[in-house]
Structure formats: structure tokens, C-alpha cells
Amino acid sequence: MLLPLSGQVSNLTDRIRNAVGPKKGMRNDVIGRFCKLACSDNFRGVYPVDRLPHKITARPSFIIIVNLGRVDGKKRFFGDTALPPGHFVTVIATPSSVHYIDPFGLPVQSDLMSKFLYYCNRRIRVNRKQIQSKKSNYCGLYCILFACYADGLGNDLKLEFFINKESLKRNDALCSKYLIRMFN
């Protein structure tokens, strides 16, 4: 039996709080369930970077969240820095462009991700503004927020954290606050 929407969101919110802790990140299934509850069918799922559904690139618009941790277990690096396993990014496609949003503000690092974006056959836009602290494990929550915002949920909110470069750690609390406001 399905819980009423508020019960489902509350249940997922509790699971998200439990899933995000020191040195822990979120799982694909938890992020996917939260976005499926909140977003339209424009949200197409959460995928590991080495399991991206290339047939989705033909859709005029879509939103996906990509787990840059690979199923094959290979580590990812940005320069000399090892990135956390399971780092999430959001991909938002419109009829004219595809947006790659990494909360760390990093460029596309994965050849698999680059190929996927290329196959979208649209102008590629990459967010280069760091929103998330390198010490934060909230990338999954940021990606949920980006997906919901792109899908029209929460467009009335002023997303202060997009411009808060002075206190990146404060952005975690703002991200959580906005998600709670969106779902209440």
C-alpha cells in the first residue's frame, strides 16, 4: 500500500537523513525514488556513468542524475585529487541545449559522460561554479534540488546557495532547507 504523498516524502526525507552522514553518500535508488515522487515524467532516472541509456538522447527534453562512480569500480581523479566514489551530477536537456551540472563546479571528467553529452546533439553547457564544499557529501541532495528546480518545482524559491562562494559548507544546510520547503 502506498503512503499518501506527504507520508512518502516524509519517509524518504528520513531515509535521506539516514543515508547522508560522515563519509557516507547517497544511493542511486534513494535519489531516484525522491525525484520520481517530485518530478514529472521528464525525470528519467539515476544512472552510473558506465550504464547511461544512450537512446534517451533522442528525447527533446529530459532530466537525469548520473553517478560518476563506475560500476566497474575504477577510481576517478581530478588532477591529483581522487574524487569521492559515487559523486553525482545532474544532466538537464532542453530542445536546444544540454546542461551538465556538477556541484563541485568541475568540467566533464569522464570520457563516457563526454560521449553521452555529444550524442545529445545539442549545445553543451557546463556549470563551472563550485556550490558544494569538497568536504561535503551532499552531492546527491544538490542533484535532487537541481532536478526538481529544472522540472518547475520550487521555481518560486530564491536559490541563494548558487552564489554563496564564501561559505560553501553553509550551502549544505541551504540545500536541505530548500528541499524541505519544496516538499512541505
Image (spheres, grey):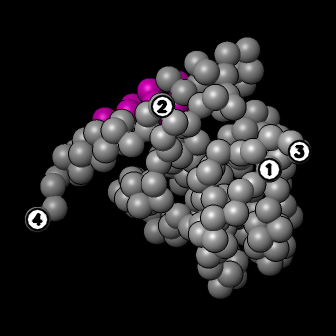
The image shows residue 51 at horizontal and vertical percentages of 62, 75
Residue position marked by numbered label 3 in the rendering: 79
Q: CA distance from mark 2 to mark 4?
A: 33 Å
Residue position marked by numbered label 4 in the rendering: 1
For marks 1 and 4, the one nearer the N-term is: 4
Residue position marked by numbered label 1 in the rendering: 77
For marks 2 and 1, the one nearer the N-term is: 2
Q: CA distance from mark 3 to mark 2?
A: 24 Å
Residue farthest to the left?
A: 1
Q: Nearer the viewer, residue 81 or 133?
A: 81
Q: Nearer the viewer, residue 44 or 11?
A: 11
Q: Are marks 2 and 4 in contact (CB under 8 Å)?
A: no
- Circle 4: residue type: Met
Q: Nearer the viewer, residue 33 or 155?
A: 33
Residue position marked by numbered label 2 in the rendering: 22
Please, is residue 170 above or below residue 85 in the view? above
Query: Which element is circle 2 on?
Result: loop
- Circle 1: residue type: Phe
For marks 3 and 2, the one nearer the N-term is: 2
User: Is residue 180 located in the magenta-colored stretch of the structure?
Assistant: yes
Q: Are marks 3 and 1 in contact (CB under 8 Å)?
A: yes
- Drawn side of residue 103 relative to residue 154, left or right: right
Quadrant of the snapshot with the N terminus: bottom left
Q: CA distance from mark 3 to mark 1?
A: 6 Å
The image shows residue 147 at horizontal and vertical percentages of 55, 52
